[in-house]
Image: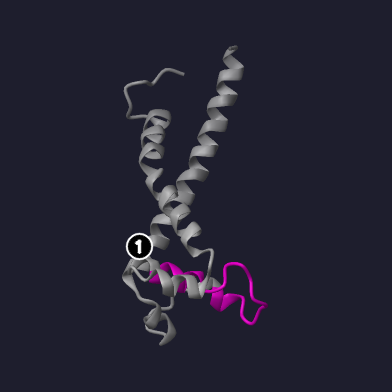
Amino acid sequence: MARGDRGAVRTAARIGLIVWTAYSVAGIVALGASFATTPAELDTGGRPLSLLGALVRPHERCPLCDMTHAFCALSHGELELALAYNGASPAWYAAAWLLVLSAVPCAMAWRRLFGGGADTRG
């Protein structure tokens, strides 16, 4: 591979890694927040986790409606309640966990690409 091609691939890898890291952090925040509250607290206004929902109201029902409630229910082991809020929530919840778990290899790649790792060749 030519030196210029290697630089382009490395730049693309860095950009992809930055985007993946941002998504991983968002998944960590979403899952962390879902463990910190319950659907009942959301209903009573105890914790305003659904900022996006507050910004887009009123709106037609969308595929992600009640997903915040469903994530909170799943984080507290209430599968039936989560399915009542949104039938697709277990799939989205599993995808969020996969994204969060991918943060470890992503961090290792970050370290290798941006310094601190043993392999610092260009």
Occupied quadrant, residue 120:
top left
Look at label 1 and name its amino acid: Gly
**Residue 86 point in image, percent of width and height:** 52, 70
Element marked by disc 1: helix
89 shown above or below 107: below
Q: Residue at x 35, y 62 (%)?
A: 32
Does the magenta-highlighted stretch encompass residue 65? yes
Q: Quadrant of the N terminus?
A: top right
For this orientation, the residue located farthest to the right is 60
For this orientation, the residue located farthest to the bottom is 44
Front residue of 101 and 25: 101
**Residue 84 point in image, percent of width and height:** 49, 75
**Residue 79 point in image, percent of width and height:** 40, 68
Q: Which segment did they paint magenta?
A: 53-73
For disc 1, the marked residue is 32
108 shown above or below 68: above
Local packing at callout 1 (Cα closer than 10 Å; few below 14, some 14-19, many 20+) is: few
**Residue 47 point in image, percent of width and height:** 39, 79
